[in-house]
Image (cartoon, coloured by chain):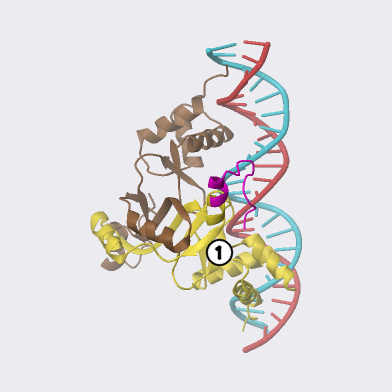
Chain colours: A brown, B yellow, C cyan, D red
DNA sequence: CTGGATGCAAATGTTTTGCAGCATG
DNA sequence: CATGCTGCAAAACATTTGCATCCAG
């Protein structure tokens, strides 16, 4: 039999240890290095690929820049700050009844959904309204 | 004064002429060539960038592979076939009341939203159920 | 002339692939 | 010792940038 896969488990451990909701490949690779492991980029990519297929990770549907990943668990939607790019999880905002209505209207079968709300995090909202006009806002994440 | 921008207008014309709901950069550049214009890739990128800022185009939030763009207009959501990757527009499935509830629950201000439903287009559903187990489905788009 | 738009090329960034070596069952 | 994970390198793909040039005002 083959040798057991180290990297995927290290990735899961890293993400469970937390500190971040969504991770880029670069952040995962860096985190592994920092944890004393030293996985190659391609190994991390392959590990993430396997974990996605196994439904242990999910891709965060931001759709710009590098892809980001999170632990798969309870389904949730996301909200992202348009100013500082912070990301937060959110209870699902879609109702089954609306999805069923969309199925009837479109003729498609709907299996999953991905929702990203764009808005302002509390801090950016305060900074923007509050009159701090000099700054471009706090640093991201 | 500067010379007037040709490429952005050519892009808008191309997308209005239709034939496709969402366009990759490559498809846009190819479409311009086919139309007798011959815009460079970088010019197309810069044109799309400007059109995005001017809200004349919108990025389709698929988040995998090359980015895709569409004419900005009435807001709509998208549904995508997980089997053949076809994409269709859909009337918005989110209610203001749910967004306001999310604002109250999260403390964020919500400005926009992006929704992609994943499912099966009518044709793929028929092929999958119908028993045609040999094929991997019809070609995409 | 001037300033933004364009074309060309090259840099940058992200993801995927080929292949040899290695560690386990 | 066969299998599939790993590391290294390079390819493939996507996006952005620098710079010389062009052109309508």
For mark 1, what is the residue? B69
- Image position of B110 (left or right of B84): left
In this rendered view, identify the residue nearer to me: A54 or B29. Answer: A54
Number of callouts: 1
The N terminus of chain B appears in which quarter of the rendering? bottom right
Asked if residue B114 is positioned above or below residue B54 in the image, the reply reads above
* Secondary structure of residue under mark 1: strand
- Image position of B1 (left or right of C20): left
**Mark 1: few, some, or many residues within 10 Å (few <14, many ≥20)?**
many
Camera sees residue B104: yes
Q: Which residues are magenta?
A: B126-141
In this rendered view, identify the residue nearer to me: B63 or B128. Answer: B128
Q: Residue furthest left?
A: B104
Residue found 33% across the figure and 68% down from its top = A133
* Snapshot quadrant of residue B35: bottom right
Asked if residue B66 is positioned above or below residue B72 in the image, the reply reads above
- Image position of B136 (left or right of B38): left
Residue found 54% across the figure and 59% down from its top = B87
């Amino acid at each position: 039999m083959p040798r057991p896969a180290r990297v995927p488990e290290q990735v899961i451990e890293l993400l469970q240890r937390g500190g971040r909701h969504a991770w880029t490949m670069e952040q995962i690779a860096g985190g592994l290095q920092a944890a004393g492991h030293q996985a190659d980029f391609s190994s991390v990519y392959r590990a993430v690929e396997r974990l996605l297929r196994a439904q242990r990770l999910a891709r965060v549907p931001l759709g710009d820049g590098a892809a980001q990943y999170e632990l798969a668990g309870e389904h949730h939607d996301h909200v992202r700050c348009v100013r500082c790019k912070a990301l937060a999880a959110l209870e699902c905002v879609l109702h089954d009844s609306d999805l069923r209505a969309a199925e009837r209207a479109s003729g498609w079968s709907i299996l999953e959904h991905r929702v990203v709300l764009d808005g302002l995090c509390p801090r950016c909202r305060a900074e923007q309204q509050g009159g701090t006009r000099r700054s471009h806002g706090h640093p991201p994440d």
